Image (spheres, rainbow, N blue to C red):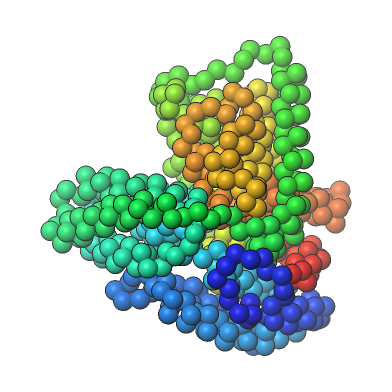
Amino acid sequence: MSAPIRTGLKPKTHISSLLMISILIFFRGVFSAESNGASGAYGDLVTLFHDLRQLECPTGKDGVPDYSRTSLNNIRHRMLDVEERFIRIDTSGWTIEQKVDRELVRAEMNGLDFNLRVLQPWQRDPAYYVLLWSEQSDTPSHEGPVCHAAIEIWEYSFPLSAEDEKKLTAQLKVIPPFLDQARTNLTGNARDLWNEGIRNVSIQASDLDELEKKTESAGKEFHTSLSNAKNATIKFGEWLKQQLPLKTGPSGIGKENYTWYLRHVLLEPMTWDDEVTLLKRELARAYASLEQERQHNKALPPMRMISSPKEYDSLADHAVTHLMTFLKEQKVLPVRDYMEPALRKHLGSFEPEGKRSFFTIIMHSDPLILYTHATHWFDLARMKEEPHQSIIRREAQPFNIWDSRSEGLATGMEELLMRCGLYDDNPRSKELVWVMLAQRCARGLASLYVQSNEFTLDQGRKYHVQWTPSPWNTGDPSLVIFEQQLYLRQPGYGTGYITGKYLVDRLIMDRSRQIGKDFRMFNFFDEMYTTGMIPVTLIRWQLTRNADEIRDINYSK
């Protein structure tokens, strides 16, 4: 990381000085004697962690994020000091938990380095300048690169209180100067990212229209701020369209950069080629298992779609009750009082036929299927109600470092709970589990080929649809548009559902082999949850005391 920052997308073919030195310190730390106490150096790590978080948020005048050349050069210069402080920290005598915290901080440093050196969203990606967010993500933080000045409209209640109106007014005032700055910063040549950004800016303009309808009773200052934000957004979108013909370059980051991000930021012990192999295998398994389930269920009546709002509400309510009862009675995992209310806030609603996307078609077949994936909401509630004792693990890490744990476990829950008997009274629902696995493999493979620049984004979307099982590959194309853009903007995300699931499966294998006949899923989840929302490789190190995966990641380029 202390090597010169590069502005192009050439692969990283060297090991930075930070990586080389930290390898030596890592080995020393891993094999040093463990103790129950912490050395004073752990306090230095916490201080460095706070300083790094501040460094990641370059705020300029009046709260406007500053991604100017001067600001970025300042961050690069200050990173040198952070790197030197990091490699001086002596982990002798640290507990494994403390060493895991150190690896989280290292991953954050690598994430900032990668943003400065390769991803450069402020330079290549117009969508980075979209600040308005109307819906809450089901993951620990936003999926993909999002500016820290994001305006979370979903957090507000309408009509606005006086305090909220003042806060939102100040946030909206950031939009015009931020978009003015974007015209200078956006010097990249990534055509697909640029083209998709035009659509995102248009969505922000529409969201501002909706916000105006919700805030008719607000004061003059608020409406002036809102009007200025909307006008600036519209003009920015027009400027992007004018510049589009000049954008002719690729948008993917290439295989080597992609692999570096996987290993050193997401802490997944895989390469681009490894992920292609894994996802092709899982795609074949999903298709084969789907046909085997159909064979097994051939004497059963076909699955019917929910046909009315009343029926949807009834089945959704029954599905949540059934899921929570199953988890309690079968003792699959620890159930807390906050879990069911968290899930019931996100039941979805009836949509007419013809307006349904892939996932809403699944929901209108059996809502229970996606409620197993919606254990995401359990995780978010747990982070709020049972905050981790380590400040380094308490909040979501940036750069989607939590991806393998969050999306991997949620995806894994679909098959895991099926295997545990959740759908024994409704065998047709098992078919949907394999349909969803196939779809995630299809979109993940498409994202890999887009990142390697073997596919354009449009070609990736066609592949995504082509390899999603029929007739489930019909419906609203906006979902495919959204997903493939996200996976282009955020390396590793489109595949994280499958690679994360694989890493969770391996962790279950390792723990069951360690514990033997006394292994229980309930106990496994109980100890897994105590580690926090961190990469599965770090969870594995903490639970098994085996550092081989992290050691391999730190030693690789």
Residue at x-position 41% and y-position 52%: 244
Does residue 69 appear to the left or right of 44 in the view shown? left
Does residue 434 appear to the left or right of 508 in the view shown? left
Which residue ends up furthest to the left in the rendered image?
220
Residue at x-position 49% and y-position 73%: 56
Q: Position of residue 127 (x, y in %)?
A: 43, 55
Does residue 517 appear to the left or right of 188 in the view shown? right
For residue 548, above or below residue 433: below
For residue 545, above or below residue 48: above
Q: Position of residue 165 (x, y in %)?
A: 23, 59
Q: Position of residue 521 (x, y in %)?
A: 73, 47
For residue 431, above or below residue 449: above
Q: Position of residue 240 (x, y in %)?
A: 37, 54
Q: Nearer the viewer, residue 280 or 341?
A: 280
Can you say which quadrant of the picture contains the C terminus? bottom right
| Number of numbered markers | 0
